[in-house]
Image (spheres, rainbow, N blue to C red):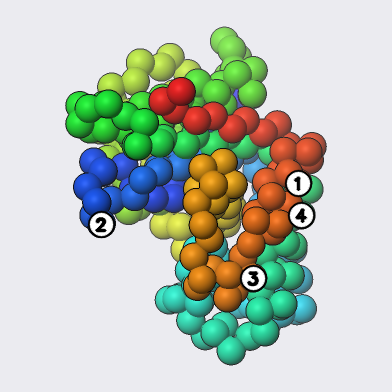
Amino acid sequence: MQTKLLYFDESGDDGIKIPGNSSDFFVLSGICVSSADWRNSLAKIKAYRNELKKEHDFPVSMEFHTYEFIKCKEPSESFRTWPVEERLKILRGMCDFICSLELPIVTIIYDKLKADSQGVLGRVLETVLKKCIDELEKLCRFGEDWNYFLISDEGRLSAMRKAVRKIPNQYMIEEVFEKDSKHSYFIQLSDYIATFTRLHYRYIICGNEIPQWLKSKQIDKELILDVMNRLGDSGNVFQHVVIPK
């Protein structure tokens, strides 16, 4: 019997779309690590974080929260004085590192603007989580000799557990385990993937104009496309699904 650990993080929110009160899109990203490879993968991440410290003085213990890093908000506000080029180098380097891990990744985008009722929107998290688990099972070739744990940031724990209880699944152990993203490099990697997936969907797929504040950080279509293309072309088993179709 082999066990997988599925680490989840999201970008946006799963609330009902109310102008100015909820995001248009909700993205859930999952990254899958075999228990047999977990220690080796963690060692690689720690080595990478030590390199970040050495090259950019980014604290090893500091949470890498991608959107906050881009905006230079807490906990990344101390990097506000860094040159934009240095922050971009870190963002590109993070993408290269994730690709080097060659771990199964799946991202599910829920486009609330396509939903036709509040009833559908009320099941956003359940719908997205079920689809994410289904796709990860396909990627990881789960079968009779497999089982897995779900691990989520503490901020989503209650909602995730409620959603999971509605999803019949014979391979899942327990419901959802809590892990503070500050103390989980794997959740931080999922956060990076979710953030760029949402940027890609909003500004590339949907064609929305990139706001000036993002442009001032040199977050443009070229960078977003480059990151997503690298993830898709890497050795990672990468799945990208939009719902509703």
What is the CA distance from the residue labelled 2 to the residue labelled 4?
35 Å
Q: Amino acid at mark 2?
A: Gly
**Image height check: is 5 above or below 119?**
below
Residue 39 bears which disc, if any? none
Q: Which residue is mark 3?
A: 218
The numbered mark, 3 or 4, whose residue comes first in the sequence reads 4
| Residue at the limit of the structure toward the top, as seen here | 144
Q: Would residue 107 be found to the left or right of residue 49 on screen? A: left
Q: Residues within 10 Å of mark 1 (few under 14, many from 20)?
A: some
The numbered mark, 1 or 3, whose residue comes first in the sequence reads 3
The numbered mark, 1 or 4, whose residue comes first in the sequence reads 4
The numbered mark, 1 or 2, whose residue comes first in the sequence reads 2
Q: Amino acid at mark 1?
A: Arg
Q: Amino acid at mark 3?
A: Gln
Q: Nearer the viewer, mark 1 or mark 3?
A: 3
Asked whether the beta carbons under mark 1 and mark 4 sit within 8 Å of each other, the answer is yes
Q: Which residue is mark 4?
A: 96
Return the x and y of residue 107 as percentages of the image width and height.
54, 37
The numbered mark, 2 or 4, whose residue comes first in the sequence reads 2
Q: Residue at x 45, y 42 (%)?
A: 27
Q: Which residue is mark 1?
A: 230
Inspect this view and state whether residue 81 appears.
yes
Asked whether the beta carbons under mark 3 and mark 4 sit within 8 Å of each other, the answer is no
What is the CA distance from the residue labelled 1 to the residue labelled 2?
33 Å
Q: Residue at x 67, y 84 (%)?
A: 83
